[in-house]
Image (spheres, helix red, strand yellow):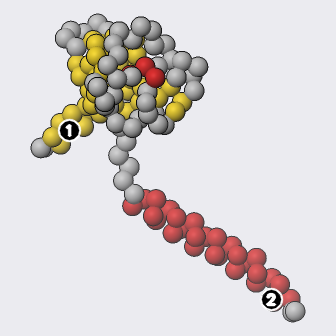
Amino acid sequence: MDIRTIKSRPALLAVAGLVVAGVGLGIGLTLPTDTATPQVLQGTVSAVGVNGDKFGVSLDGRQPGKSFGLGAVPWKDTDGTWHDSSPIDCLKPLSQGQQIRFGVVHVNDPDFSTDLVAWVDCSNATG
């Protein structure tokens, strides 16, 4: 092996690394950057639907109550452990009276507007 071959390998690796980094940066810049920070709400559950997919809540300091649809969202149990599958401990079907805290993101589209539940915190649930 001659000296030119040995000296060119680190340079070739550096050039390849720069190309890969440039491609990664280019892809990253083309991805959407929209984010939403959930509004944190808390209150007393007035009713959970028979399938556990919706609930009503009387929000602390606000009247009247409000209802929310509920999909597969992350939730925290009374031990402070996060889960990513249902059922949600503090929102069992047909339950009521428990205190919960949850995050909501408002979605506004010209044809559709709603509040989506982003997460549920059962760590302080009582009731």
**Front one among 41 and 125:** 125
Q: Residue 108's mark?
A: 1
Residue 91: x and y in percent read 38, 22
Give the vertical position of 101 relative to 114 (above or below).
Answer: above
Name the image quarter holding residue 126: top left
Nearer to us: label 1 or label 2: 1
Residue 97: x and y in percent read 35, 9
On-image quarter of the C terminus: top left
Q: Residue at x 87, y 92 (%)?
A: 1
- Residue at the extreme bottom of the image, as rendered: 2
Q: Residue at x 39, y 38 (%)?
A: 72
Name the image quarter holding residue 104: top left
**Front one among 53 and 62:** 53
Q: Amino acid at mark 2?
A: Thr
- Rate crowding at label 1 as few (under 14), some (14 to 19) or many (20 or more) other CA atoms within 10 Å: few
Q: Residue at x 57, y 27 (%)?
A: 81
Is residue 47 visible in the rendered image? The answer is yes
**Residue at the spot of label 2:** 5
Give the vertical position of 29 relative to 52 (above or below).
Answer: below
Q: Give the left or right position of residue 51, taking residue 8 as reference.
A: left
> How far apart, in angstroms, are the residues tagged by discs 1 and 2?
60 Å
Q: Residue 29's mark?
A: none
Q: Amino acid at mark 1?
A: Asn
